[in-house]
Amino acid sequence: MARNVYGLDLGTYEIKVYDKKQNKIWKEKNVIAIKDKRNIFSIGDSAYEMYEKAPDNIQVVFPMKEGVISRFDDMQYLLQNLLSQDRRFARGSEYLLAVPTDVTEVEKRAFYDLVVHSTARARQVQIIERGIADAVGLGLDVQNEKGIFIANFGGETTELSVLASGGMVLNKLVKTGGVQFDLAVADRVRKNKDFLIGRLTAEKLRREFGVFDEKNDASLDVAGRNLITGVPQIRTIQIGLVRAAIKEPLEEIVRSILSMIDRLPPDVRRIINQDGIFITGGLANLPGLDTYLREVINLRVRKAKRPDLCAVEGLKKIILNKELGTLTYSMLDEDYRWLR
């Protein structure tokens, strides 16, 4: 009998974990600080606090890139240590992993290998597409609904999934997320103000102003560097500048959503037109995002109660309800023999 069951949602910038034994969901930043290019200095939230502040001999790295694992060994080290730090970590446990919907089978296999080929010595590893986990987390009847459209807004990607009768109808991974929004804000401030700000400062502006509301004259003072004099200073940044920057990458996501709706089978599209779309992921908390999407897509838009935890809450429900286990699969199945 397995000693524990974990549900893992490995996002580009945050790891979300459901621990069955403790019946608890927790999350941590998906980041490692490396000293002198070889020694692990810090991991998780404490490493993230060093981002854009670390000295030259400490490199802050993110093992995930655009939704997939880019630094396998670092990701494995990070996950093993996070699970073992006061989490009653046990070898021989079972794992349910949420993976991006529109990636190659080899990239999915990397998620599987992350746990199997580690000190965790997993007893069993099951896989589920994140779009399906999101739908379960939303409380939808995934196995019987004839049309569900979910947009998961993440750190570097937006995952678009259309489900019907427990399966995937269409999916697309748009390589645009919160990071691209922040870089767009920083770039707009640099070009319009000759003022250099870091990504975290741009993120602060993006979170403060959002995409859409009644404000039109708000502003925020932020620290940065004057590109003309080279001197650090405080500048006032207006809301209009930030929102104009955000809408550029957001338009790419909107085009992808509209394109996917146009490609839907008529019966599924009719249901989507009636029920609208659901938005999940950490970026879904951006103020006014649901209102903006409703205006430009001309469909009902519903946001998950806790969008950043929606997928891992879906994993929890699947782990606790054996009937939902049919939504998962193992990469040891016959269909994946070629990957072994």
Image: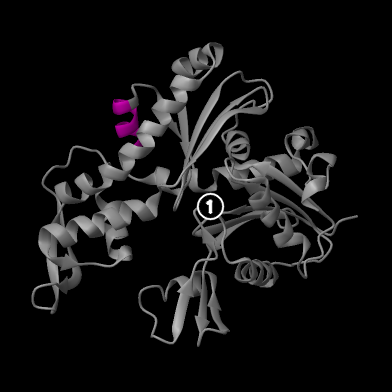
Type of the residue with mark 1 = Gly
Q: Main secondary structure of the magenta part?
A: helix
Q: Position of residue 15 (x, y in %)?
A: 57, 58
How many callouts does the rendering have?
A: 1
Q: Residue at x 75, y 42 (%)?
A: 320
Q: Please provide the residue range marked out in magenta.
A: 289-296
Q: Residue at x 49, y 19 (%)?
A: 272
Give coordinates of residue 223: x percent, y percent.
Answer: 20, 70
Mark 1: few, some, or many residues within 10 Å (few <14, many ≥20)? many
- Residue at position x 24%, y 60% in the image: 186
292 inside magenta stretch = yes
Question: Which is nearer the eye, 135 or 70?
Answer: 70
User: Foreground residue, 155 or 16?
Assistant: 155
At which x and y percent is residue 242? Answer: 21, 51
Rendered position, 336 above or below 23: above
- The reply, left or right, for residue 107 in relation to residue 267 is right
> Which residue is painted at 69% across and 69% down in the image?
80
Q: Which residue is mark 1?
A: 67
- Mark 1 lies on a secondary structure that is loop
Up-down relation of residue 334 to residue 218 (above or below): above
Residue positioned most to the left: 229
